[in-house]
Image (cartoon, rainbow, N blue to C red):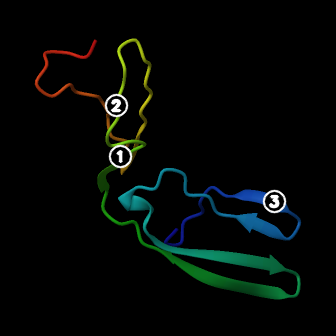
Amino acid sequence: KDGRPVDSSLLSDETLVLVVDVARQEDGGLYRCEARNNFGTDSDTLGITVTAPVQPRLSLSSRLVTLTECDTVTVSCNVVGCPQPTVSWLAIGRDELP
C-alpha cells in the first residue's frame, strides 16, 4: 500500500490475492500488484476507498404474530451494521420479557 509491502495470499503459481479483512479507514489508498522476472516487470494499480461505518439496519422475520396460550413462537431479528451492533429485544409497556 502506498509503496509499502502488504500481507497477501498466494493461491497458485499465477495468482496472488490481496485480502483486506475487516476494512478500516486506514486501509483505503492505492495498492500496486507488481510482477518481476529476468525479462522485465509489469504492474497495475488498484484504488481502495473505505466508506464511513454503516448504521444498523434490521428486518424482522414477522411483524405480527397471533398465538394461543401455551404456543411457542420464534421471531428472528436480522441485523447488519459496521461496526457490529449489539442487539436486544425489549418488551414495550412491560418491565421485562418473560
Q: Mark 2 highlights which residue?
A: 66
Task: Give 7 or 5, whichever is nearer the viewer.
Answer: 7
Q: Is residue 39 above or below residue 7?
A: below
Amino acid type for the residue under numbered disc 2: Thr
Q: Residue furthest left?
A: 93
Q: Along the polypeptide, which appears first: circle 1 or circle 2?
A: 2
Task: Return the residue at label 1.
Answer: 83
Judging from the image, what secondary structure is the residue with disc 3 in?
A: strand
Q: Position of residue 44 (x, y in %)?
A: 64, 84
64 horizontally vs 93: left or right: right
* Residue indicated by mark 3: 11
**Is 61 above or below relative to 97?**
below
Q: Is residue 8 above or below residue 33?
A: above
- The numbered mark, 3 or 2, whose residue comes first in the sequence reads 3
* The furthest residue to the front: 68
Instruction: Identify which residue is drawn at 39% across, 60% down.
Output: 26
Q: Give left or right: position of 2 versus 38.
A: left
Horizontal relation, residue 27 to residue 64: left or right: right
Q: Secondary structure at mark 1?
A: loop
Residue 36, position as x, y percentages in the image? 79, 78
